[in-house]
Amino acid sequence: MQIAIFLYDRFTALDAIGPYEVLSRLPGTTVVFVAEQAGPVATDTRMLSVVAAAGIGDVRHPDIVLVPGGPGQSVASLMEPGPVHDWLRAADEHSSWTTSVCTGSLILAAAGLLTGRAATSHWLALERLAELGARPVSRRVVMDGKYITGAGVSAGIDMSLELAGRIGGRDTAEAIQLMIEYDPQPPYAAGSPQTAPPDLVARLRHGSRHASTAARS
Amino acid sequence: MQIAIFLYDRFTALDAIGPYEVLSRLPGTTVVFVAEQAGPVATDTRMLSVVAAAGIGDVRHPDIVLVPGGPGQSVASLMEPGPVHDWLRAADEHSSWTTSVCTGSLILAAAGLLTGRAATSHWLALERLAELGARPVSRRVVMDGKYITGAGVSAGIDMSLELAGRIGGRDTAEAIQLMIEYDPQPPYAAGSPQTAPPDLVARLRHGSRHASTAARS
């Protein structure tokens, strides 16, 4: 089974690496990192580069496609028609699963792959997902047929464990969970807008609106 | 503040990228990935390479040192005296925090930095940590003065959120947690040997003993 994780300039590293860490442990699986061109791809912080082993032209029919997210401006450049949308649509025709983490779902939606489908995204991007024709659901992992979307950044770990269970069965998924010792114990309860301090949620919403207005102007 | 994350052949990606994703969001922080030589470093699966931006010789006095883990054989090559131990000890002399994830603690211990200290590691490596002179504690995150160690792979996220709180305060750490939407909801409860099915725990322990016997013989 071949899993293609699509990288692009300023993607968010954990969106891609969380699922990779889980899915690469599925027996009989190869994960290949792809980008428009093979080579190092810089993440959103500019402090890290991850190597795309292949160009999208070299990986035509992966069994699983995964699109990580990134901050507004990085994703904005992938919202227009072009070779990435063409590749995503062609890959999706043959894929067993088409998946995203965080704002990666905006890219899938812009490529026309989530129209009318239930999907999730980073909590700050759910409205945008609706504008692109998907049915946003505020859940950590959303499955609609073969389309699986995860919420923000770290949700890719939960999403891919769920997917590992569907593919390899519960026992295999549990073995992966135990080997990566995924027994989360966050020191704070601020991981979702429902549980975080309301003033923090308001502040980040405000900051995000300003950032996206700037990005669109 | 400079944070050096040390990469080496066959490290486990999520051990390094989880903490990077948290700590790079601390205001005024630069994360630099280092290795014995700068350039791409392949992970344990051989399906991914991450770029070390600098060689260890170029990053002498980081404020935080972080050593990720890897499977037995990858870590084994870093258990002997050599330039990596020299660098770790010199960096530790000036660091505010010296940290590890997973079996990265075995490397710190082999370099003599955890002698007599409370520390943790991947659940399959706790005994080995004792052999190296540390006091193993079966907890997700263990702090002993400026030495912070995290348990297996995904525990680096919890460890670094805890560290972010110590450095930036609770409000900053909570903002990071909310931006990476770290509201974990694993689909199974198999993340620790205490909660996983006992036969699965036994099977992985058995496999690990065989692997480490093979590696040492």
Image (cartoon, coloured by chain):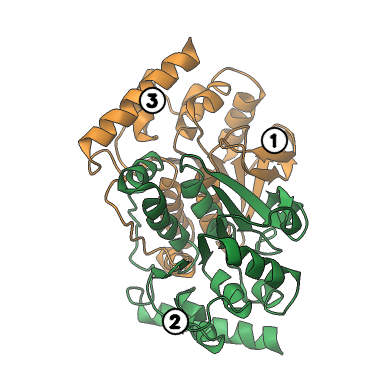
Chain colours: A green, B orange
Task: Same chain for labels 3 and 2? Say yes or no.
Answer: no
Q: Secondary structure at mark 2?
A: strand
The image's mark for residue B208 is: 3
Q: Chain of mark 2?
A: A
If the image is split into quadrants, where does the N terminus of chain B sit? bottom right
Q: Amino acid at mark 1?
A: Ile
Q: Amino acid at mark 3?
A: Ser
Q: Could you tell me if residue B174 is visible in this image?
A: yes
Q: What residue sits 65% from the left and 51% below the top?
A: A33
Q: Chain of mark 1?
A: B
- How packed mark 2 is, by other alpha carbons closer than 10 Å (few <14, some 14-19, many 20 or more), is many
Q: Which mark is residue A136?
A: 2
Residue that badge 1 annotates: B56
Q: Estimate the x, y position of residue B36 in percent, counting from the top left.
A: 70, 31
Task: Identify which residue, B2 or B123, lies in the foreground.
Answer: B123
* Chain of residue at mark 3: B
